[in-house]
Amino acid sequence: MTRISVKVDGVAYSDEVEPRMLLVHYLRERLGKTGTVVGCDTSNCGACTVHLDGSSVKSCNMLAVQADGHEVTTIEGVAQNGELHAVQRAFHECHALQCGYCTPGMIMQSIDLLNENPDPSEEEIRLGLEGNLCRCTGYHNIVKAVQQAASEGKGSAS
Amino acid sequence: MTVTENRVDSPEIGKARTRKEDARLITGRTRWTDNILLPGMLHLAMVRSPFAHARITSIDTSAAKAAPNVVTVITGADVADEQGSLPNVWPLSANQKTPPHPSIAVDRVTFAGEVVAVVVARSAAEARDAAELVDVDYEELPAVLDLKEAAKDEVLVHPDLGTNIADVWQLDSAAAGSGTSVEDEIAEARENGIVLEREYRQQRLIPAFMEPRSFVCDPTGEQVTLWSSTQIPHIVKFFTSVILGIPESKMRVIAPDVGGGFGGKLQVTPEEFITVLAARRTGRPCKYTETRSESMMACHHGRDQWQKLTLSATKDGTVTGIKVELLADLGSYASLLAGGTPVLGAFMFNGIYKFRAYQFNCTPVYTNKTWTDAYRGAGRPEATFAIERLMDDLAVELGVDPLALREQNWIKHEEFPYATVSGLEYDTGNYEAATAKAKEMFGYDELREEQRRRRESNDPVQLGIGISTFTEMCGLAPSRILGQLNYGAGGWEHASVRMLPTGHVEVVTGVSPHGQGHETAWSQIVADRLGVPFENVQVLHGDTQVSHKGLDTYGSRSLVVGAEAVVRAADKVVERAKPYAAHMLEASVDDIEFAGGHFQVRGTDRGVSMGEVAMAAFAAHDLPEGIEPGLDAEATFDPDTFSYPHGTHLCAVEIDTETGGVKLRKYVAVDDVGNIVNPLIVDGQVHGGLVQGIAQALWEEAVFDDSGTLVSASFVDYLVPTAADTISFDIDHTTTPSTLTKLGTKGVGEAGAIASTPAVVNAVLDAVRRFGVKDIQMPCTPERVWKAIHGHGAGGDEPTEGGAMPHFDEKDVADRSEGAAQ
């Protein structure tokens, strides 16, 4: 067992973990952060996407011990003071989710995409979300939601 | 006394309401089955067969049992007397050959992935570690993997049955009296008309819902409670009870948040039963959550048919007869619906056209592969693919525009209701209107012009235009017809509406959503019906203890059948409320009118709100004579017939003739799904369906190697499309309300998936026919398209090159052990 210290959604945790434990299992099973889900075992689907020090990572593709000393943000930590994040709001308003299983990862990846490129073209959005699978929406409304969040971001920046 | 103000100003139905469901889904406050943790819970791991067909000669579980924190290991022999056989509810006839289907194989495995033992441990990781220690000895048996080979009966999947052919099923228009003899029409056309003979392949697909299946069973307490990521909690409850011998009243099934299904969770699964068996044996809560690879390997697959088709027409292009001979791959067992799935397409191969004669023959066949069942569209995509491909082929044969040929043959809007050659009566539709709108949105004439230019200039990138003018049968299903088809249950749906004292409403529905947005749509419907605010309606579902009666969600049935039950229950509430209102207003019941949430005495301004009546009925202080307290009502709706959504889909693809790469250029879908309750949700259903259908045309295929191992058993190899593969769609609607229900809806869940596959393949072929290509098997991969263009297997039906197959390089012998040279 290895001791790790990690901050998740603003709260500091210190735990003994098996070295083989994946970050996603640590989040779900040890911290009860079940908003982050597992969709595959080959890091293709992106359902488990979280932010590590502000950048997106697939938490099934990372060991819990690798998060030692880092800061993790999950879907449960993106709304601030009861206010939804602009991307969460856009997903709701554009009907960018149906069953909602891919949604946490899709939102986390979309936030990362917009942090990197606040004004993406449709093609840049599509390429930026390539690592996240959705089986329900056909991506049409997900792309729209990211576009809407981007245009709101532009509004607030000006 | 304060009551909620109930008046609603504008109708909810038709509003693009954002969904109630979203709040929990976008914030991670969800209740997936795998999230559930119970005190003392144990975890399961499956040991699965690596062989497609083998005898189990021995299983040594001692090492696994001795592993840390393992509680027990269960083999098929251990539960042989209690596990029963998994259900098949749709035997095609009394003659169907149906092998017993154990949850855990006892002495023989019939596909690679079948469960042979189950490890129960204190953690999922320890269960999985110990599963590696279960030592199973197999004696390999000859396996038959190919569908056509299996139909020859040279190698038997179940030797005891004596054949691989489960049954034969026929629908014949001459015998049924719905048309003439197909053989006569074909003979006539051979003399004086045109006969097309084609064989199309429906490849095997994997539903690939995003949430892997998960089951939790709690045997403690008075009841056995099973949480299941299922589309069908009521059906699971029935069969768990009947087959595992638990009194129905002691069995409770809960489908909490369920992450997609697409037919893949329309199943009573071995893993579900195993979780219950393990909980019963250990007396402790047990959980099993599959890995993605297990899901791909062992969740039922879809499609997988050979379609032999004969179409007859007159020389002027008027279609006369269509004969269908299907071989359908069941995999190694008869699943819940099994041969019933291809038979769901039996009434649809004539599509929207006025054939005189029709014959449908279906032969479901066992093979040593994962068993198949419903996948989005279930039977109807296969039928639509066949007829829409044939119509394009006929247009090519005649040298006419494929849309003009369709119009020449389709049912005109003034001809509805129309009795079809397959024995259905299409109630409403307007194919002209949908097509006119689609053509305009698509820029059909401009794209044809661009196509001509590219052809003339021998542009290396060729343009193809594909058409699909489809219909489907929805609203599954009239119980009477299901009975005639030998289906084991009915097709009704149930709902209850509870008026709470505050004027809020609880709606209990028997359907079980897993992404469709029923909580939102049902709230809109009830808000209008009872005149209460949208926000004040709560929709309850998915727990057999709350929703005690229902037949669940599949086959685009929820809105058509399930919501109609809600409407009828709500209307009963209004009728129950009228005597109260009359009593409160000191008027005669006959003078009470209800509108917008208010009961009013006709011709006066005296009225009471639904909320006030609900409170009065709750308090029951002053009841009208002979009336019992309360307004709650329930209703069960059994449809008389089906609903028939239709639409025109137009697709343009660009094909790079030098690489075989196919790029979507434009996709227009104009669907008539009847009245629309929530356009936002309807459009979302269409988008998602389109991509699933397009994925069948271009990307997805379940591939087995020669030994029966599924090689596309992960998202690395099974190509579920990404955002980067797809485009934004242009969709719109025309509306002819269904006459089946008060709501006039037709169903939309499967439309996109049914219509889009032939539109895309027709577009691909339209681009490359000039190179002598007649057919390209799905998925139309760059390799297949390139080979078809360049004459290497013009049919595009050669197997994928070894180098292009998903595989681990056999030559890769690098030593990766610790300390090895890098």
Image: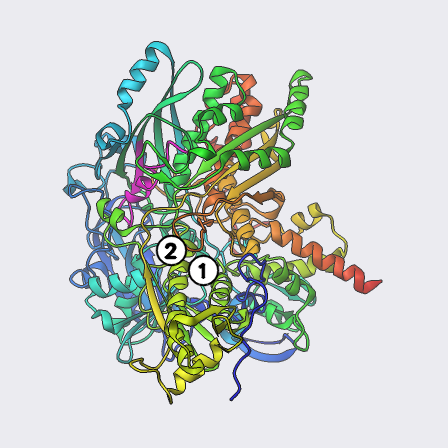
Segment tinted magenta in the rendering:
B326-351
Q: Where is mark 1, residue-wise?
A: B514
Q: Is mark 1 on a helix, strand or loop?
A: loop
Work out which residue is located at the far front of the displayed protein and give it: B603
Residue B374 % position (x, y): 36, 47
Depth check: A53 or B96 in front?
B96
On screen, residue B530 versus residue B313, left or right, reads right
**Mark 2 or mark 1, which has the lower sequence index?**
1
Q: Is residue B717 visible?
A: no
Q: What secondary structure predominates along the stretch shown in magenta?
A: loop
Residue B561's label in the rendered image is 2
Instruction: Please identify the quarter of the rendering in which residue B571 is found.
Output: bottom left
What amino acid is labelled 1 in the image? His
Q: Distance between the residues labelled 2 and 1?
A: 17 Å
Residue B335 part of the magenta-drawn span: yes
Q: Nearer the viewer, mark 2 or mark 1?
A: 2
Q: Which residue is drawn at 27% across and 66% down?
A: B73
